[in-house]
Image: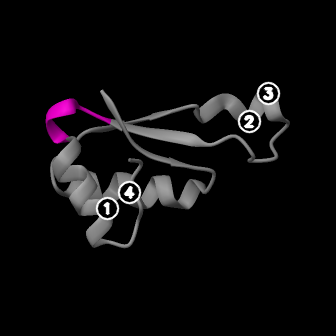
Amino acid sequence: MKELLRTTDPTEIVFATALLTQEGIAAFELDVHMSILEGGLGILPRRLMVADRDHFMASAILRDNGLHPSP
């Protein structure tokens, strides 16, 4: 798995996941429950992961829709 997106904005994660699902690319969100450790402040980023084989196409989909994938 490769990291596709890292953000503190939960709406970006939802939008990216919806875009990828429409294209048949499975995505997995990591660090969802980190808010317990930070007290719900939203300062720790969440990560969106995709399979290695889907990373190039998923990055292109995010860029085409105004999101900035992780390098």
> In the rendered structure, which disc, 3 or 4, sits on the residue that comes first in sequence?
4
The percent position of residue 49, horizontal first and vertical second, equals: 37, 36
Horizontal and vertical percent position of residue 12: 50, 60
- The 10 Å Cα crowd at callout 2, few under 14, some 14 to 19, many 20 or more, is some
Which label is found at residue 37? 3
Read off the residue under disc 2: 35
Res. 16 mark: 4
Cα gap from disc 4 to disc 2, whole angstroms: 20 Å
Please report whichever mark, 1 or 3, sits nearer to the chain's N-terminal start.
3
Residue type at mark 3 is Leu
- The nearer-to-camera label among 1 and 4 is 1
| Residue 30 locus on image (x, y percent) | 50, 31
Circle nearer the viewer, 1 or 3: 1
On screen, residue 61 versus residue 53, left or right, reads right
Q: Secondary structure at mark 3?
A: helix
Q: Which residues are magenta?
A: 50-54
Given residues 15 and 63, the one toward you in this image is 63
Residue under pointer 1: 62
Q: Is disc 2 in contact with disc 3, using a CB cutoff of under 8 Å? A: yes
Q: What kind of residue is marked 2?
A: Ser
